[in-house]
Amino acid sequence: MKSRESRKLDHIRYALCVGDGPCASGFSDVHLLHHCLSGICRNEVDLTCLLPGLPALAHPIIINAITGGADAVAKINESLAIVARETGSAMAVGSQFGTVRTGLHRDSYTIVRKCNPKGLIFANLSAFASVEQAKAAIDMISADALQIHLNPAQELAMEEGDRDFSNCLSHIEAMVQGVGVPVIVKETGCGMAAEQIKQMLVFGFTWFDIGGAGGTNFPAIEAKRFTSQKSVLAEWGINTAKTLTEAFSVCGRNDIIIASGGIRDGLTAAKAFALSADVVGMSGNILRYIIEKDIEEAQRALTDIINDLKMVMLLTGSSDLKALRNVPIYFTGELREFLLGRNYDISKISAVRKR
């Protein structure tokens, strides 16, 4: 069995090797209608993102949870924190669960706050964590919010992974009530169905990072780590476009939806916002720029994505993010079949996606 530190390094190495997929994110089946008379000046497009209980963000793209928990990845988190600072992006760290239990490798996380003292930073823990461990993770980086990740498919694909998920919901409920910052329930690449989101809403959860299939694929990464392991779970899950429709069908106006999973450019981000996402998370593409190029290239790439989002908004007549929910859209292919199979009224979704 490999150590937790070696596992962290494996995840970085194989994330770059495996890449996105094999499932597609599903956004190629989402189509925005062009507005030839948008009547908007590009400089008037407003990307300001307001989230309850947090400072305003200049734009709605966050650098999502990637790594931490090994001395060798501290430099990666330092680079990501610099990119976040220079682009005005929120950032989530990777899982702190091992560190809050052992006290080891704290520097791989604290470097983020050190490099970005005024930034919006999210802590990250397993759903197996206690309230005390959650508070420790938040205090470690003076976090503004806490991500609680759900990753049963990854755990099952790991030789050293957990097999008992019976107490996850009660643990998350305790953290929501006990930590004093917004708690984001986050899937890590298999998505969320409307039925489970409804269940969590009943328990008082209001922030969801839907983490759909189509981006970084942890079951596939685990299969690479253990050559004897079958990759049957590599194609498991609900892709991001599908799970986003599931989320907005049950979430209310005061609930927060973070779309993540294979969103790599401004057009795809615009489609996610059109489907009622409040925020978009990216990780794999930013990591690749950091590892294979440098901080400046990563910063330039993220800035380009933000500017491309503005262009798409102008071309749909959307002066702000909420206006994207009024843009006419239509669905094709597998996503359309999914919506019909789940008994959604496609005509209503196509007309307007107000929550």
Image (cartoon, rainbow, N blue to C red):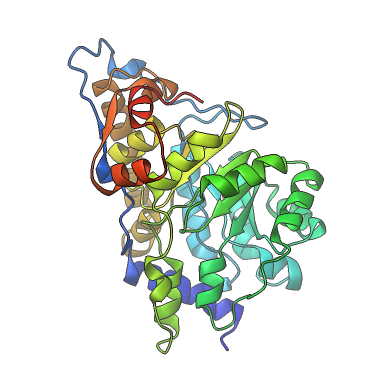
288 up-or-down from 281: above or below: below
49 up-or-down from 169: above or below: above
Residue 233: x %, y % from top left:
43, 71
Choose between 7 and 164: the one closer to the eye.
Answer: 164
| In the image: residue 86, left or right of residue 308 | right
Choose between 191 and 303: the one closer to the eye.
Answer: 191
Q: Can residue 224 be seen in this view?
A: yes
User: Residue at position x 41%, y 39% from top?
Assistant: 343
The residue most toward the left is: 36
User: Residue at position x 59%, y 30% from top?
Assistant: 51
Residue 324: x %, y % from top left:
37, 24
Give the quarter of the image for residue 219: bottom left
Q: Can residue 116 be seen in this view?
A: no
50 up-or-down from 115: above or below: above
User: Residue at position x 61%, y 38% from top?
Assistant: 118
Give the quarter of the image for residue 293: bottom left
